[in-house]
């Protein structure tokens, strides 16, 4: 996924050697099946407001989770973790 002029799009890999086949276990298969059911339920819930896509990482309404959304949430969780750690250290003192 790359950002082209402010729009996130899927593009091919830079080289053919960058393409990989991966093997997944039954645990991941089961997780993906449950996730697929969640997507179908959300599609029914949102109706015409649901965004269709072939992506796995989507928001509840079907819109794509972009790298910038992941970065934002990761930073937010990191900051919250630091706050919790600092509070715990103050409690120990």
Image (cartoon, grey):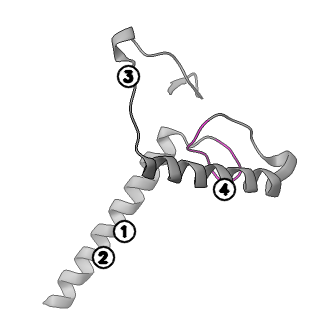
Q: Alpha carbon of mark 1 to alpha carbon of mark 2: how far?
A: 6 Å
Q: What are the residue bounds of the magenta stretch?
A: 55-63
Return the residue at label 2: 84
The stretch drawn in magenta includes residue 58 = yes
The stretch drawn in magenta includes residue 23 = no
Residue 57 appears left or right of 17: right
- Label 4 or label 3, whichever comes before in sequence order: 3
* Residue sitting farthest toward the left: 93
Residue 77 placement (x, y as % from top left) = 39, 62
Residue 68 appears left or right of 43: left
Please report the residue visible at 40 percent of the width from the left and 25 percent of the height from the top.
21
- Label 1 or label 3, whichever comes before in sequence order: 3
Which secondary structure is most common in the magenta stretch?
A: loop
Return the residue at label 1: 80
Return the residue at label 3: 20
Residue 27 appears left or right of 53: left
Return the residue at label 4: 38
Residue 40 placement (x, y as % from top left) = 73, 50
* SS label for mark 3: loop
Please report the residue visible at 74 percent of the width from the left and 56 percent of the height from the top.
41
């Amino acid at each position: 996924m790359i950002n082209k002029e402010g729009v996130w799009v899927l593009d091919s890999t830079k080289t053919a050697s960058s393409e990989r086949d991966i093997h997944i276990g039954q645990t991941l298969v089961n997780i993906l099946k449950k996730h697929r059911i969640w997507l179908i339920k959300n599609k029914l819930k949102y109706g015409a407001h649901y965004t269709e896509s072939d992506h796995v990482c989507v928001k509840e309404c079907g819109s794509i989770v972009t790298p910038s959304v992941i970065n934002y949430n990761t930073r937010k969780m990191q900051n919250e973790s630091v706050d919790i750690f600092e509070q715990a250290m103050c409690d120990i003192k």
